[in-house]
Amino acid sequence: MRVLLVEDHDELATWVMQALRALHFTVERAADAASAESLLFSTHAGSAGGAGSDYALVLLDLTLPDRDGLDLLARLRARGCRVPVMILTARGEVGDRVKGLDLGADDYMAKPFDLAEFEARVKALLRRARQTEAPLVVCGGLGFDTVSRHFQVGGVPLALTPREHAVLEILMTPPGKTVSKDRIYASIFTLADDTQPDVIEVYVHRLRRKLDGSGAAIVTLRGLGYVLEPSVG
């Protein structure tokens, strides 16, 4: 399950990303509003389920270097982006809270916040969002339950390591979109990890072996990245 964190403060961003990755979320970060819009409205982000459907949740700071986060929120909703948004900000005044919720935010937390409460509210927000969505994503004979976050092939659970699971989930939600190696890497690893983007090739190789006979295949598009598609034959 993919989360977009829009936060310009490096230390806080690292702390939040580590907390979410410990819960097995894949996280991408945008340090300003322009980068966030580029990710949410890229060619592939709006390919299925509306703009921003690549992400299960957006965590949004309000004090961004290029413009106010409330302006970004208003622009997202005006353009039809339905992804749930949780505001994380030092601006905890009632007026800011009311304006944020009125503009379409689904939750609002003032900094500093307790990690346990933050994690609980993220889980609750995602549970509410999933109640309106189809719980099962299918590609060929491969199925992904978005509620339990389990993969299966022909009704049989697919055994995956945590990193294999993270890579496959990025490609599966939704299938048919092209994802670059660098984007997968940035979603799974942090600066503290002693690895390079080429390590993604190792996980893709392992996944291809495990998906053999599943009716789904990871296809390499040279210079662009990877795409998960139903396999032929």
Image (tube, grey):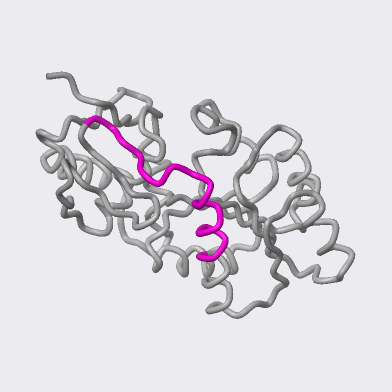
Q: Quadrant of residue 7?
A: bottom right
Count of numbered circles on the image: 0
Q: Is residue 124 magenta?
A: yes
Q: Which residues are magenta?
A: 123-140
Residue 78 in the image, given as x and y percentages of width and height: 76, 35
Residue 205 in the image, given as x and y percentages of width and height: 16, 40
Please identify the residue farthest to the top as the structure is shown.
232
The residue sitting at 40% across, 29% down in the picture is 177
Q: Nearer the viewer, residue 206 or 94?
A: 94
Residue 56 in the image, given as x and y percentages of width and height: 51, 49
Q: Quadrant of residue 150?
A: bottom left
The reply, left or right, for residue 48 in relation to residue 230 is right
Tell me the quarter of the image containing the C terminus.
top left
The residue sitting at 81% across, 64% down in the picture is 97
Q: Quadrant of residue 207?
A: top left
Is the residue 228 above or below the residue 114 in the image?
above
Q: Is residue 216 magenta?
A: no
The residue sitting at 54% across, 65% down in the picture is 124
Is the residue 140 above or below the residue 104 in the image?
above
Residue 225 in the image, given as x and y percentages of width and height: 35, 30
Q: Nearer the viewer, residue 179 or 54?
A: 54
